[in-house]
Image (tube, grey):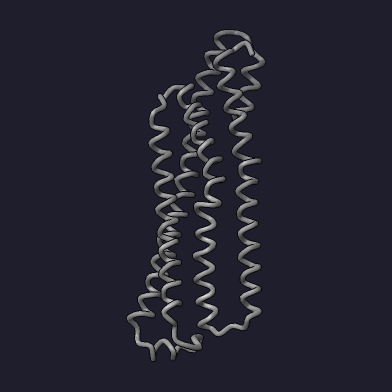
Amino acid sequence: MEFSELKMIWDSQNQEPLYAMNEAALHGIVQRKNQEWNRCLSCCFTAEITIGLICGALMLVCAGMAVFGDPAWLVALPWIKGPPSRWDILAVLGSGGIWFYYSAYMFLARKRQQRRVEIFDSTLRGDLDRALAETDFRIAHARSIVWWGLVPVWVATSLWLVVFYRLLAMPAGSYVFIGATMLGAFVVVVSGKQRSITNRFEPRRRELESLRAKLADPQR
C-alpha cells in the first residue's frame, strides 16, 4: 500500500481505535519505503563511484603504457597510426584525474547525506522527516550534479575520445560527429535528471509533506 492509499483510508475514518491502527500501519509503510529508498540510493551511488574508479584507473593504465611502454610496440598495434604525443598523455592523465574526482565527489555527497539523516528519531514523525530529508537531498543532488559531476565527466570523456581519434588518425568530420553525439548525450542525461525531479522526487515530497501535516492536525 502506498502513502497516498493509506492517507485516503486515514481521511475516511474518525474513530480513535482505527486512527491508532492506521498510525501504526503508516509507520511500518514509512519504514519500509525508507529502506527501499535507501537501498536504491546506495546502489546508485555505489555504481557511480565504481564507474569513476574504473574509468580513472583505465586512464592511468593507458597513460602508463604510453609513458613506460615500448614506442615501437605501440606503433606496431594495427589500430594506432602514430605514437602518442606528450599532450596526448597529459590529456589522458587529466581525464583519469577527473574520473577520480567524480568518484570522490559522489562518495563525499553520500557520506554527508548519511550523517545528515542520522539525527532523526526512529518514530513515525522522525521517519517522515528522514524521508523528506532524503527526498530533498535527491532533488538538490540531481540539480547540482549537472555542473559538479556531469560537466566534468563530459570533459573527461571528450578528452579521451579526442586522443583516441587522433591516434586512429580519424578524419576531421569524425570530430564533428563525436562532438554532436557527446552534446546530444549530455542533453539527454540532463533532461532525464529534470524529469526525475518533476515526476518522481517532487510528487514524493508533496505526499510526505501532506502526511506530516495530517499527523500534526488529524482533523485536516
Which of the two residues, 8 or 177, is positioned nearer the viewer here?
A: 177
Which of the two residues, 19 or 211, is positioned nearer the viewer here?
A: 211
Q: Is residue 77 above or below residue 54?
A: below
Disc count in the image?
0
- Residue farthest front in this picture: 87
Quarter of the image that includes the N terminus: top right
Which of the two residues, 8 or 60, is positioned nearer the viewer here?
A: 60
- Residue farthest left in this picture: 68
Q: Is residue 73 above or below residue 46?
A: below
Quadrant of res 8: top right
Instruction: Residue at 47%, 54% (x, y): give it.
Output: 48
Q: Is residue 146 above or below residue 122?
A: below
Left or right: residue 100 versus residue 13 is left
Percent of width and height locating residue 212: 55, 21
Quarter of the image that includes the C terminus: top right
Left or right: residue 46 versus residue 172 is left
Instruction: Residue at 53%, 35% (x, y): give it.
Output: 136
Quadrant of res 207: top right
Instruction: Residue at 63%, 51% (x, y): give it.
Output: 192
Percent of width and height locating residue 68: 32, 81
Percent of width and height locating residue 51: 45, 59
Percent of width and height locating residue 121: 40, 24
